[in-house]
Amino acid sequence: MLQRGIKSMKKAIVIGSGAGGATAAKELQGTYNVTILEAGKAFKPFSLSLSTVDKLKKTGLFFDEREIQLLFPAMKIQKTAENMVMVSGKGVGGTTTISAGNALRMDQDLKALGIDLDAEFEEIYQEIPITDNHRMKWRKTTNRLFEICEDMDLNPQPIPKLGDYERCYNCGQCILGCDYEVKWDCRQYLDQAIENGADLITGCEVKEIVIEKGIVTGVRAKKGLRTVFYPADLVILAAGGFSTPTLLENAQIKCEPNLFVDPVLCVAAEHKGSLQNKEMTMPFAVQREHYIISPYFDFLSFYFNKNWRHPASDTLVLMIKLADTTSGTIEGKTIKNSLSAVDKERLQDGVKTCTEIFKRFGIDEKDLYLGTYNAGHPGGMLPLTSAEAETMHNDRLPENLYVADATLFPNSLGNPPILTIIAMSKKICKLICASN
């Protein structure tokens, strides 16, 4: 009876298994018969020891950040024409598996449009273990940085984390996949959806959203050497801020040239025995008007930037994450995004702040060096407006096609987006189910 009931349900295709897609699959399964299409494979944490990778670095074989994909397929690397490194997740769980596990509520811009996500955030707090009580796990160096930021009246705050961080082993590999299952990621939502009857198909890259007479009838995807058509009554597009706009444009649905990416620039110095490479990623943050500062061991800069010559255990790093101006776009497979004059000015202000923190730590400005420009929070190319506050659905889209990822954000957050994407996806699914 159960199987017959599932087969009689309307079919929903969810494209992508990251924060937005996994949430949509969990929320819709039961009202719809859900199939999740994921371009990548099952996620596996980074398998090589960092000492092994360090030896490879010394051979001089590491010269392009895209090489990391050979060792860690879940981390997809692209580059802009200006050589900014773009990082995204490819695999079950999307970018949540290679995130720092941060759980920050960042819906101010959505609230200003009239979008109320209070109920959705409350649900999240009931479903996911979230804690900012992890200072007892911090190393001496991190505590000292926190105290300096307090002395500078920068108001540092421990970052809430997704997961049970009382069990954190301080392995330092949050963004390389948590081997100890301390960090929560969206695979747990996927597991719930699958337990309730959803299907997950991996290695399945959607190439086309099929629209007939203004209605989506399904999607075409590449599965191995075959092209497969998956029929659908509803499609949720949550392929991420880089891929979602491409699929929309391929379907003749115009996006806006508003791509933001949250650029990152790290400031580093040698400090013997800092062991930041063995610290939880982003334990606390200083929130400034246009950027945040947080301790963050930048593995990409460490392995591929020739200026990063000190041993990992002796490298101390502060990250600047910028809320960039939305002026980028995607044309085919080409990402066009460059730092504006305003962005560069704000980053330099961040560098000055980091320089003062390091100075109070006892490190001379001349001993500081910078990391590689990189970014990993793309979005903004189909931004919500107040006109969509009630529907969460852009009029350019067919009535049975919804977007449920950072593509909907009206502005760069300059902060980790996972929690807000989950809340937004929940809201969208409630509206869909209410109209079903």
Image (tube, rainbow, N blue to C red):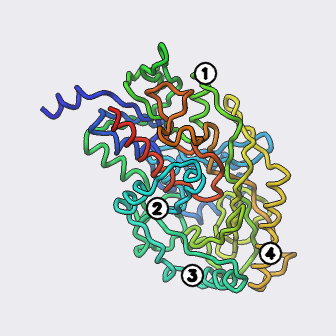
Q: Identity of the amino acid at label 1?
A: Gln
Task: Give the residue number, with chain letter if any, for mark 1.
Answer: 252
The crowd level at tag 2 (other Cα within 10 Å; few <14, some 14-19, many 20+) is many
| Mark found first going from the N terminus, 3 or 2 | 3
- The amino acid type found where label 2 is placed reads Cys
Q: Earlier in the sequence, mark 2 or mark 1?
A: 2
- Near-viewer residue (261 or 300): 261
* Residue at x 79% of width, y 64% of height: 370
| Residue farthest along the top direction in this orientation | 213
Q: x and y percent of residue 231 in the render?
A: 38, 21
Which mark is on residue 178?
Answer: 2
Left or right: residue 113 versus residue 325 is left
For mark 4, what is the residue? 355
Q: How many numbered badges does the structure rendering display? A: 4
Labels 4, 2: front one: 4
Q: Nearer the viewer, mark 3 or mark 4?
A: 4
What amino acid does circle 4 point to? Answer: Thr
Q: Residue at x 40, y 31 (%)?
A: 13
| Crowd around label 1: few <14 · some 14–19 · many ≥20 (10 Å) | few
Residue receiving disc 3: 139
In this view, the mark in front (3 or 1): 1
Disc 1 element: loop
Q: Residue at x 66, y 68 (%)?
A: 287
